[in-house]
Amino acid sequence: MNKMTFERIASILISLLCFSAYSTNANDLTKNIPHIEYIKPIELIISGEGINRISFAPMIATTIWGNATEYSALLSNNGAELFLSSKVETGKSFALAVQLAGGRVVDLLFHTVDVLMPNIIRLNLVDQNLAQDEQKLEIQQMIKAMRSGATGKYYITEDKQKLVVTPSLMANWGRVYRFKNLRGVVLQLTNIGKNELSTSARELAKSFSNVIGVQLNNELLMRGQSTNAFLVLKNGDES
């Protein structure tokens, strides 16, 4: 290897090392960039003249932040209602931040209009993820109660109707469990066809409206064989 070739290779290696170091530093810098999100406030229209009522029920407001020269505010004793009147010129807006029990802060932007009748506004601020988790828990508890035959908190009736789910599958209704907006149904499924029958929770759910939970004891039924299924439906719809 002559001197010129060696120097050229060395120069290329140094360039590659420098590029690699720059890339690593650039990636490190990118990792350190914070995620920034600009959150929009909830916009509400209120009377510029009257005392408006903002309801947070079932949530509870604990603290209010804002420019006190722009509004007058009073929380009810239970913390669920905010009585609010504007001090700004009608047609203008002002902002408030409200802290709820548990620490969540809600940003509100109020637009005032020229009406004497105060507005009564209900804000549904229940955390949707929390509501979904609570519903999943209720579904699990209802299916567990149906499987064990427990009564507990449920209102239970007997329903003797029959439903032909498919030409080969008959569903006999049994106990019906009710709690709030949920209805649980115990079904006895029977293969009334001439051959063995394969079914599934998904296929069974398609035969009913508003099904949000299904458990099936046995997915494969021989001719004349029966199995139990447990359905949870929302809003009391059955078919």
Image: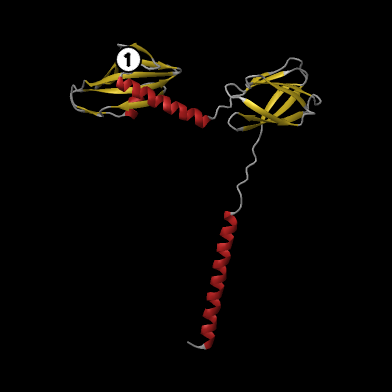
Rendering coords of residue 185 (x, y %): 34, 18
Going by the numbered disc 1, the residue's amino acid type is Arg
Residue 212 position in % (x across, y down): 41, 25
Left or right of residue 193, residue 59 in this image: right
Can residue 212 be seen in this snapshot? no
Foreground: 85 or 233?
85
How far across and down, in percent of the image, does residue 200 sit? 30, 29
Q: Secondary structure at mark 1?
A: strand
Which residue in the protein does label 1 denote?
Answer: 175
Give the camera-side residue of 97 and 113.
97
Quadrant in which the C terminus appears: top left
Relative to 100, is 34 above or below?
Answer: below
Viewer-side residue, 143 vs 114: 143
Left or right: where does residue 165 sit relative to residue 65? Answer: left
Residue at figure coordinates x 32%, y 27% from the top left: 215
Residue sitting farthest toward the bottom = 2
Name the residue: 30% across, 15% down: 174
Tell me which corner region of the image, top left, top right, bottom left or bottom right, holds residue 196: top left
Left or right, 181 with respect to 20, comes to left
User: Is residue 201 shown to the viewer in this render?
Assistant: yes
